Image: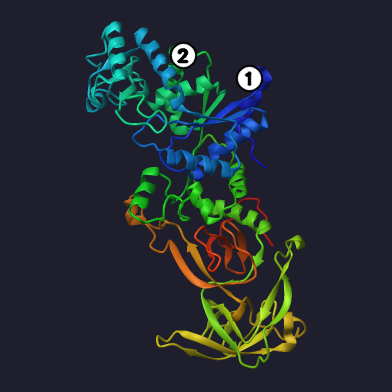
Amino acid sequence: MENKHFIRTIIENDLKSGKHERPITRFPPEPNGFLHLGHARAIIMNHNLAKDYRGTFNLRFDDTNPLTEDALFVEGMKEDIAWLGCHWDNLFFASDYFEEMYERAMVLVKKGKAYVCDLSAEDIKATRGDLTTPGTDSPYRDRRVEENIRLFEAMRAGAFEDGACVLRAKIDMASPNMNMRDPVIYRIQHSSHHNTKDAWCIYPMYDFAHPLEDAIEGITHSLCTLEFEDHRPIYDWYVEHCEMPKVPRQIEFGKLIIAHQVTGKRFIRQLVEAGVVDGWDDPRLITLSGLRRRGVPPEAIHRFVQALGLPKTEGETDVEMFNEYVRDVMHATAPRIHAVLDPLKVVITNYEGDVETVMNAPFHKDDETFGARPVHFGRELYIERSDFLPDKPDKHWKRLSLGLEVRLMHAYFIRAESFDTDDRGQVETVYCTYDKRTKSGSGFKERKPNGTIHFLEATSAKTATFHLFENLVDPDKDDSLPLEARLNPHSKQAFSGFVEAGVPFEEGDAFQFTRNGYFAVDRDASEDRPVFNRVVALKSSFKAPGRKKRT
């Protein structure tokens, strides 16, 4: 269930009063990187609010800075949003409106509310003042309207070099809101644009372009995060003084911040270029493409976002809260099979004969529609190395050790009798005996094994690679340290092991590996050697209020 939040109340009141017939919302990313989990709140909420009230949801790319934007990011964002299932009704680009934006800026110039300023960017910054000191008027602030028209037209025609001048709004250099102190509207950038190519050499600033885009599209509820609250006066000023026929309303909500995760596009780009991560879709990142590659089901993202709602305040959310929703979805949808990530060979010394099928085990204990698969048993097996202790265990040890008996899941009781080691002293093979009377653990109620472990029959097991992930950033390190000093050197571990044969593995397929967690097939998998990413571990210490324990 989605929490009822203040924006739903606003929309319902607007519809009830007749202010709007239906809501029109939008998600307006700048295509200068890839989307992350924090963006999912805005995407899903804008989409759902439009659909729930029979409105329209627009996807609009705020592509007003050709120096940082790329068609690659446009396509990547479209893929991410479609993967979330948030299908847009209209696809727009800010660059679609460049001509109208120019004309609206010219309206300001002709009304004496905008002027061409020859100050450098450094001088403009120096004359803006601060929160306790008013700004200083530009010496070009009182240029005549006719001169500003001529200069602005010359800017568009390419008569000036980058940085030679800008167009500024004429508002109030003493305003307590710094955003109202004659903000820059247009700057010169002789750079090719991914959409308009070389048609323009002047580009609008975000604060000017964004409200005009909303007004052009007839956006009724322009939802943005709290850092834009101080920008609302300039948003409204541009809409009013540019004489836009439609007046959108900006509404702010709390940004979704995931603690100890790298989300800034600049930081991710640094990690990509330095080879610290394997691209923008590295499974250790919480980019949507990284979550998709890791194997996170989009339904889990929807549940997570809807449960959090749209608060008016900001606060950090632990990634383990998100992981709980991932577990909930995968618990219901992922078939169960065995995989041994760090294999240790076991030889059953008293077993004679060929490999046998001990049972057909269900793929899902709670849903028989998943079907079943055969479990094989033979003389040679693989178990997890961590399931055997060569030293004498204490009373809390509930797995295999010399003289102790465990139950092999779906098969027999086995007892460890001896083991040998390699040249490094590492256990190489464990020699066990089995009791054929204990098939599938039946009977022998008076004989309690020292735990239950999973296994794979060696000759039928399929070789596989397994990737396990931890936080890319070490949460125990001081946040004030540079990013590179806070990186976790153990954030990715690779294991070469085995998985059940006879199960088809295709990219994106997800499974619960017994006792090891939920895994999904990576894009680098091959038919001969599947590669799996651990999506999430089976258990977490995170306890959300009111959540029932999973069985």
Q: Which residue is mark 2?
A: 240
Q: Is 394 above or below relative to 1?
A: below
Q: Residue at x 59, y 48 (%)?
A: 298
User: Element at badge 2?
Assistant: helix
Find residue 51 and report its horizontal and vertical position in percent. Answer: 65, 32
Q: Indicate the quadrant where residue 235 lies.
A: top left
Find residue 364 and report its horizontal and vertical position in percent. Answer: 71, 64
Figure colour scheme: rainbow
Mark 2: give few (<14), some (14-19) or many (20+) Cα within 10 Å.
few
Q: Residue at x 49, y 38 (%)?
A: 255
Q: Is 530 above or below relative to 180?
A: below
**359 sits to left or right of 30:** right
Question: Which quadrant: the N terminus?
Answer: top right
**507 sits to left or right of 435:** left
**198 sits to left or right of 530:** left
- Between discs 2 and 1, the one toward the N terminus: 1
Query: What amino acid type is highlighted by mark number 2?
Result: Glu
Q: Which residue is mark 1?
A: 20
Mark 1: give few (<14), some (14-19) or many (20+) Cα within 10 Å.
some
Is residue 399 in sight in this rendering? no
